Image: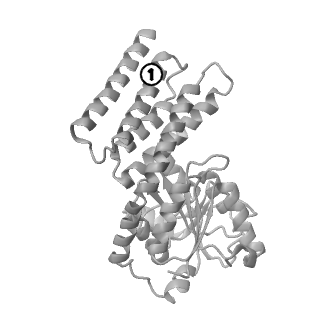
């Protein structure tokens, strides 16, 4: 695996550190990082134009978060698969989604991601995705509204009628990884298994050593002290963002987006460090700020946001890990009361 070159794309420094640490313990040595899709595209172009300066002759795998400021994961996936400037339209992509929303996962697949991995993830899950990409590459499909790997999993049952129809679809071999094949219909596109040639000499690569995987999991837990410092700073920022929120200002949408982004980051990482209540509160706050039904930020809505921040502060202040026992139940009950009060006030107002 030391021959594999990987680009990590994530705006969160701690997320990049976690992924890098796991990859290094799994034996991968050529690891590069970017903070958003713009930086990633620039780096991929640099690899093509000046490999010596970039430090790599090619990128074998892109691991990208889906939600990032400036240029997000879906935009990067679309650029890699469809832009004439993309150096390699067939680059394997693992999309990492912290959002508990099926729509976003489906979007990543529809844009051409090879695999989608949810946060919080395990080292075993990430490792198995990589091995599957190397050993079981899916043919690419070119259709009027899609270009990317076959979106069906290898275990998906295909009807006899579908198999008969697929036999009539032309299959071509593509050597040029930059050019887009031309067709007005549907094509299956196959290539040599470049990664298997590179890593296994043409043979399948074995799963990662369970001992390596265990060490990677332990390494994630070893980052707990760094996570503690980060989460305290994140919740302090969150408190400030909520306090500054003013729906009457022109910046309200941007302010709410900052809260939503930070809530998602908190939710997606808490479970990795045995803080499932942080994940619960983070995802709940994300959903609350992503609710299309509310039309104005009033005192009741602000009270609901503040209840989320209060809960997060309590979990971190008292280092409540796991389910938190009686204290954990009390915190969740307080949040549910705040939700119920907001719903009642909304019902009265309507």
Q: Nearer the viewer, residue 48 or 139?
A: 48
Q: Is residue 299 above or below residue 279?
A: above
Residue situated in front as seen by the camera: 142 or 220: 220
The residue drawn where x is 60% and y is 21% is: 247
Q: Is residue 308 above or below residue 160?
A: above
Q: Nearer the viewer, residue 170 or 92?
A: 92
Answer with left or right where residue 79 lies relative to residue 267: right
Percent position (x, y) of residue 106?
49, 50
Number of disc labels? 1
Q: Secondary structure at mark 1?
A: helix
Q: Mark 1 Cα within 10 Å, few/some/many (few <14, many 20+)? A: some
Q: Residue furthest right?
A: 49
Question: As rendered, which of 212 and 325 lies closer to the eye?
Answer: 325
Quarter of the picture holding the C terminus: top left
Asked if residue 99 shows in the view, the reply is: no
| Image coordinates for residue 251, horizontal then vertical, percent | 67, 28
Q: Position of residue 166 (x, y in %)?
A: 50, 66
Q: Going by the image, does 205 lie left or right of 189?
A: left
Rendered residue at 70%/55% (across/down): 38
Residue name at image x 54 percent, y 86 percent: 197
The answer to which image quadrant residue 285 occupies is top left
In the visual, does 135 lie left or right of 275? Answer: right
Q: Residue at x 47, y 21 (%)?
A: 301
Tell me if residue 349 can be seen: yes
Q: Which image quadrant for residue 348?
A: top left
335 vs 104: above or below: above
Q: Which residue is mark 1?
A: 303
Q: Position of residue 8 (x, y in %)?
A: 57, 63
Q: Residue furthest bottom?
A: 201
How is the rendered protein coloured? Answer: one colour
């Amino acid at each position: 695996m030391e021959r594999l070159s990987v680009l990590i794309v994530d705006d969160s420094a701690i997320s990049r550190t976690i992924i890098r640490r796991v990859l290094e313990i799994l034996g991968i040595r050529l690891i590069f990082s970017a903070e958003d899709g713009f930086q990633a595209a620039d780096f991929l172009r640099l690899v093509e134009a000046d490999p010596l300066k970039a430090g790599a002759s090619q990128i074998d795998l892109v691991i990208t978060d889906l939600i990032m400021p400036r240029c997000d994961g879906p935009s990067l996936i679309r650029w890699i698969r469809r832009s004439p400037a993309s150096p390699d339209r067939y680059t394997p992509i693992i999309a990492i989604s912290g959002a508990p929303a099926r729509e976003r996962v489906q979007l990543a697949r529809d844009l051409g991601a090879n695999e989608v991995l949810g946060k919080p993830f395990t080292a075993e899950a990430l490792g198995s995705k990589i091995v599957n990409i190397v050993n079981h590459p899916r043919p690419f499909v070119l259709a009027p509204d899609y270009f990317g790997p076959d979106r069906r999993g290898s275990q998906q049952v295909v009807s006899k009628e579908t198999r008969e129809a697929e036999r009539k679809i032309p299959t071509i071999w593509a050597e040029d990884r930059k050019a887009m094949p031309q067709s007005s219909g549907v094509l299956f596109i196959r290539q040599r298994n470049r990664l298997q040639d590179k890593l296994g000499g043409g043979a399948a690569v074995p799963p990662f050593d369970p001992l390596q995987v265990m060490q990677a999991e332990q390494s994630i837990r070893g980052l707990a002290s760094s996570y503690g410092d980060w989460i305290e700073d994140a919740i302090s920022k969150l408190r400030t963002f909520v306090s500054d929120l003013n729906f009457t200002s022109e910046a309200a949408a941007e302010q709410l987006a900052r809260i939503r982004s930070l809530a998602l980051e908190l939710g997606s990482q808490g479970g990795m460090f045995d803080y499932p209540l942080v994940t619960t509160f983070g995802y709940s706050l994300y959903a609350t700020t992503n609710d299309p039904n509310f039309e104005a930020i009033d005192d009741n809505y602000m009270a609901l946001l503040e209840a989320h921040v209060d809960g997060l502060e309590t979990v971190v202040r008292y280092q409540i890990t796991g389910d938190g026992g009686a204290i954990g139940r009390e915190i969740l009950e307080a949040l549910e009361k705040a939700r119920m009060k907001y719903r009642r006030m909304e019902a009265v107002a309507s």
